[in-house]
Amino acid sequence: MRLRVDVVLGLQWGDEGKGKIVDTLAGEYPIVARFQGGPNAGHTLYYQGQKVVLHQIPSGIFHPNVLCLIGDGVVLDPEILQREIQGLQKLGLSPTKRILIGENAHLILPVHRWVEEVSAEGEKIGTTRRGIGPAYADRYARRGLPVASIQRKNFPELVQALTAYHAARFPAHTPPPLDQTFWEGVDLLRELPRVKIAEWLGNYSRVLAEGSQGTMLDIFAGTYPYVTSSHTTVAGVLSGLSIPPQAIGEVYGVTKAYATRVGEGPFPTEITGELAQWIQTRGGERGSTTGRLRRCGWLDLVALRYAIRLNGVTRLALTKADVLCGLPEIKVRTGGTDTAPTYATLPGWEQLSDPTFEAFIQFIEAETGVSVWGISTGPEREAWMERPLPTP
Ligand code: IMP
Ligand code: MG
């Protein structure tokens, strides 16, 4: 049985609406897997009319027959996972029956969040303050704690030692105590099945891999140093889920009809003033993890082409075009430099059935060479349409 892994990736700076696309596709897969990132992610979904934000649990969780795997490339915060599971239980779901964890995923400890609070590093980047950078830094410095370590008898001492290591770096501050909520989160982790992913995936033929953040936030390919600490690109799927390149099937790339960015860093097509505020308000452009307002700008086809090439995107999903309804003109960056971008101006649309919207889609397809396969027409689960793919 040959494994095939289809992938959903963000092509911009995150918040493209990947969670919804994953939810739309998930029913066809036995497994949905997160392969990188941690609770810096905020995937907003609507389930039975209720808004739910998932930070660590894969967006397949609302499908009763889908297993949700938290892959080895992830950094996992046991406390946040526990809170998230409790939230889903309140909605009447039994998530613990369907969540599995790669034993090589790494733990985010309270001290990792604390390091971000007391060091100035995170502030410069405008991180989500979830301890992501410090946890990955420990992982790569080979002093981090893999999920498998929770089985070890001396696990409490390992946690204390790592906490003490960081405490010594910032003698003017006191790290938070390792309180009951942390240990309860660890207890919950002990109850969830942990798997050796490379072996376990051998039992399955199809997986949907769910990306977090976006290509332009990739630690290598993004706008360094204004990036996150993991591989948000297709490369992260291979290492995060221990799969060979031949296993990659369809690569769904998700982009908004405009662009947003939270946190610091270059954003060539950024707009300010009234129009930016209009988009921000209509699009609900406020971070689902941190509550910060998102910076808004026009769609950047230079960045989009780069992201498509890098990830081998085979199908595009376009989100939030409904937000732009009513604008007389839509701008799209087609070239120039990051400091002097050049734009094409296209006629706007009143509704998504207008021919001007179809013209916008065809413009994107012509400029990128990839077909727009799906269009999200609103936040709800049902607000979705697929376009016929061209016959090869
Ligand atoms: P970190 O991932 O918390 O270290 O933050 C690094 C940068 O990535 C900051 O600019 C964050 O705002 C941004 N970032 C991290 N996660 C997300 C996300 O899920 N959506 C959008 N931006 C994110
Ligand atoms: Mg988000």
Image (spheres, helix red, strand yellow):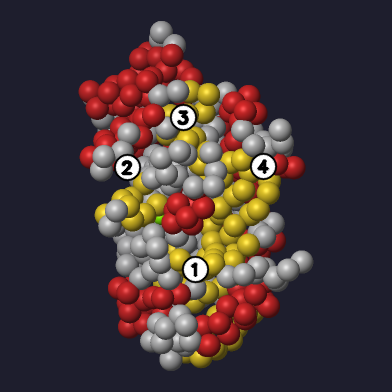
Which is nearer the N-term, disc 3 or disc 4? 4
Q: Secondary structure at mark 3?
A: strand
| Callout 4–callout 2 Cβ contact below 8 Å | no
The one nearer the camera, 105 or 49, is 49
Which is nearer the N-term, disc 1 or disc 3? 3
Tell me: residue 20, above or below residue 356. above
- The residue singled out by tag 1 in the image is 385
| Callout 3–callout 4 Cβ contact below 8 Å | no
Tell me: residue 10, above or below residue 144. below
Q: Secondary structure at mark 1?
A: strand
Q: Amino acid at mark 2?
A: Glu
- The residue singled out by tag 4 in the image is 4
Q: Residue at x 37, y 64 (%)?
A: 379
Q: Residues within 10 Å of mark 4 (few under 14, many from 20)?
A: some
Which percent across, then down, holds residue 255? 52, 65
Q: Is mark 4 within 8 Å of ligand 1?
A: no
Separation of residues labelled 4 and 2 (CA atoms): 41 Å
Separation of residues labelled 2 and 1 (CA atoms): 43 Å
Separation of residues labelled 3 and 4 (CA atoms): 19 Å
